[in-house]
Image (cartoon, rainbow, N blue to C red):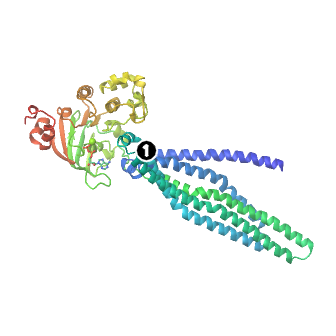
Amino acid sequence: MLACAFGSLLLAIVVGLFIASMGTSVGKAMRERQFDQVEKYSSAEINRFSIYSLITRSTNDVNQVQTAFILGLMVAIRAPMMAALAIMKISSKNIGWVEVTVFCVLVMLACIGAILWFTFPRFKRIQWMNDDVNRITKEGLSGIHVVHAYNAEGYQEGKFKKANDELTGTHVSVTRAMAFLQPVMTTIMSMLGLAIYWLGAVIISEAEGLEERLIDFSDMIVFSSYAMQIIAAFMMLIIVFMILPRAMVAARRIDEVVSTQPTILDGDVVESPAGMEGRISFRNVSFRYPGAAQDALTDISFDVEKGETVAIIGSTGSGKSTLVKLIPRFYDVGSGEVVVDGVNVKDYRLDALHRKIGYVPQKAVMFQGTVASNVNYGDTEGERTEEDVRKAIEIAQGAEFVERMEGGYEGKVAEGGTNLSGGQKQRLSIARAVCRRPELYIFDDSFSALDYKTDRQLRSQLKKETAGVTTIIVAQRIGTIRDADKIVVLDEGRVAGIGKHEDLLRECEVYYQIARSQLSEEELVR
Ligand code: ADP
Ligand code: MG
């Protein structure tokens, strides 16, 4: 018996280790699958889930499934085996005993079913509420300066309290339902014991002779201990049932992420036809954001030749950023087509299209790391030397501030670039595009946080360095774009005029109005 006990201990340890490593690999695999899938998402899919939900899905939800998986393996295999063995041992015994045992098992299953039915939808809500709590916390923390400056702590607390109370309330109701489980099971177990002894007493009292009575008595003891084993097995299973509903909800949420196909899919063109490099055409392009009531762009057509600098100007909200986002295919057009290097952007393999483009977003994006890791970023990373990085930063007029930073080019950049000013981030963001050496630059209002002097120096340097490279500049300042080869004036998502500065001043009222607000009388001669 000692040897058996020791052997069983050893086995339990080995199995435990095995299950733990299996469970954690399952968790790892789920996180990886989700991350890979989410990276393929376009903004439409990300907005559908919301960033906060995607984060809880790859952390909290994965943990739920992982826990259920580990406990499930530990219990879900062992318990039914225990039950099956016990059932085999006693099924040939007195029929009355078997009947009560089966009846008790059925009652137990019914209880578990009822509780699952009650808790399942609530667990679903709990996961959603987790998303909410997450979102409100993140929103409040990332906007903490505004919260403080407007004394909005109370307001934020109120929002948080509401979400937190909802979450707590649902948790409480679920936990209450769960709390029933254990006592109900214990009661069933005791009742079963009682029933077996009751039946046993009748059987024994009806038997004749001491020997037969003794046999009946020992049968009863054996039966009741096996019956208890069956119930105990089910009790073990209850632990699984307590976490199963939540894990099922979590698994479903993970599955949603993994099985949602990105709307923007790869084409198969890798090489564009010779002789077409650096050309972009918009042909009758209309576009509407998912769920929006109006088109953000309507019937846009214009061409950009190789090496040209084309500027896009218009009041805020006129669709400038939207327009340039169609070139790297962050969104698909509603109708019409966007053609880069003679090929519709939808036909490119996305990495091939993106390889051509140096995109500088309106709001500079920085990643935690160093200055160099932020500038030398992406799939060209291995091909650029330290010298290239320095050069790119110099062109972007960033050398001065970077060299003053502690650590210089290896200086730390905090998450989101919070240790840099807006203008510094913009310059690094421009350096990133320069370092990529693309065929085509897109600057989405990338000079707005720079002072006039830096703006001018940067553009003249860029012009020297990027001669022959097609450039699209979105800008607010007439000064930034007046030398452009072509200016596209946008007004409420439509083209209000295309041409050179002087021509537009004469012919395009929208452009004239923008110019009048910025230029002196002499500069405005029509
Ligand atoms: P601009 O860059 O000229 O200031 P945008 O291109 O950013 O203008 O926006 C054009 C219009 O599209 C605006 O009316 C704006 O409300 C809308 N819009 C911009 N981004 C989104 C989005 N992600 N979802 C829905 N509507 C958007
Ligand atoms: Mg914009």
Q: Position of residue 207 (x, y in %)?
A: 87, 76
Which residue is disc 1 drawn over?
138
Q: Position of residue 101 (x, y in %)?
A: 72, 69
Does residue 501 appear to the left or right of 19 in the view shown?
Answer: left
Q: Which residue is drawn at 49% across and 47% down?
A: 58
**Residue lying at the far right of the rendered structure:** 210
From the viewer's side, name the closer residue of 458 and 195: 195
Does residue 243 appear to the left or right of 310 in the view shown?
Answer: right
Q: In the rendered image, which quarter is residue 220 located in?
A: bottom right
From the viewer's side, name the closer residue of 274 and 301: 301
From the viewer's side, name the closer residue of 151 and 23: 151
Does residue 37 appear to the left or right of 503 in the view shown?
Answer: right
Q: Where is residue 402 in the image (x, y as percent from the top left)?
A: 36, 24
Quadrant where ligand 2 appears: top left
Is 332 located above or below residue 481 in the figure? below
Q: Can residue 470 be seen in this view?
A: yes
Q: Residue at x 59, y 55 (%)?
A: 243
Q: Position of residue 272 (x, y in %)?
A: 31, 39
Q: In the rendered image, which quarter is residue 193 located in?
A: bottom right
Mark 1 neighbour class, 10 Å CA radius: few under 14, some 14 to 19, many 20 or more: few
- What number of labels is visible? 1
Amino acid type at mark 1: Lys
Q: Is the C terminus in the top left, top right, bottom left or bottom right quadrant?
A: top left
What secondary structure is found at the residue carrying circle 1?
Answer: helix
Is 447 located above or below residue 490 in the figure? above
Does residue 450 appear to the left or right of 204 in the view shown?
Answer: left
**Residue lying at the far left of the rendered structure:** 526
Answer yes or no: disc 1 within 8 Å of ligand 1: no
Q: Can residue 252 be seen in this view?
A: no
